[in-house]
Image: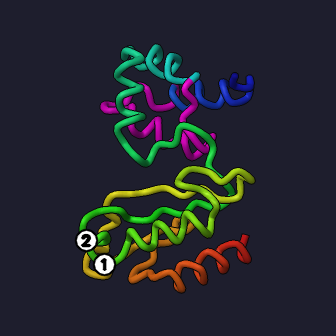
Amino acid sequence: MLTETTQQTIHHLVAAKKHMPGALLPILHDIQEAVGFIPAQAVADIAQQLNLSRAEVHGVVTFYHFFRHEPAGKQVVQICRAEACQSMGAEKLWTHACSRLKTQGGTSADGATTLEPVYCLGLCSSSPAMVVDDKLHARVDVDKFDRLVAAARSEA
């Protein structure tokens, strides 16, 4: 169930851009930035305000990996799982990250970290690549992973 404040925030964000051509994606980005994720309970309201079906809105939310369906942890780690990164050790990196962060992907039980797969960060020539709290990193091995995650936690 959404709080009244969250419902008002979402309604306001939709109303602010609903008359733009192609408004759905910018609105979803705004909602995720404000709320931290796209609540399933908000899909009907978004659809109604944009004169779209709930299926259309749901389809966009679930198609793009960027949109979260639940709140993220305090720290967000994204590891590229595309072919170039896979060929340079991303599978080993993913396995290590799952072990270190105590999750098989998603948010850890303590809510501290969210681990997400992404498919291409654009650093194919310097893979494997990852993002830690919106900061892009290249040529990441398990040691560099540990250093980056520890540094990000100490900055928080």
* Residue interval drawn in magenta: 15-40
What is the secondary structure assignment of the residue under circle 1?
Answer: loop
Assign a secondary structure to mark 2: helix
Instruction: Please state if 139 lies on the left or on the right of 132 as rendered.
Output: left
Q: Is residue 124 left or right of residue 114?
A: left
Q: Residue at x 74, y 23 (%)?
A: 4
In the image, residue 77 above or below residue 6: below
Residue 39 pos. (x, y %): 58, 31
Q: Quick check: marks 2 and 1 in contact, CB under 8 Å?
A: yes
Residue at x 63% of width, y 64% of height: 101
Q: Is residue 104 left or right of residue 25?
A: right
Q: Residue tagged by mark 1? A: 88
Give how far apart the Cα atoms at labels 2 and 1 are.
7 Å
Question: Which quadrant of the rendered structure holds the C terminus?
Answer: bottom right
Specify the quadrant of the image occupied by residue 51: top left
Q: Main secondary structure of the magenta part?
A: helix
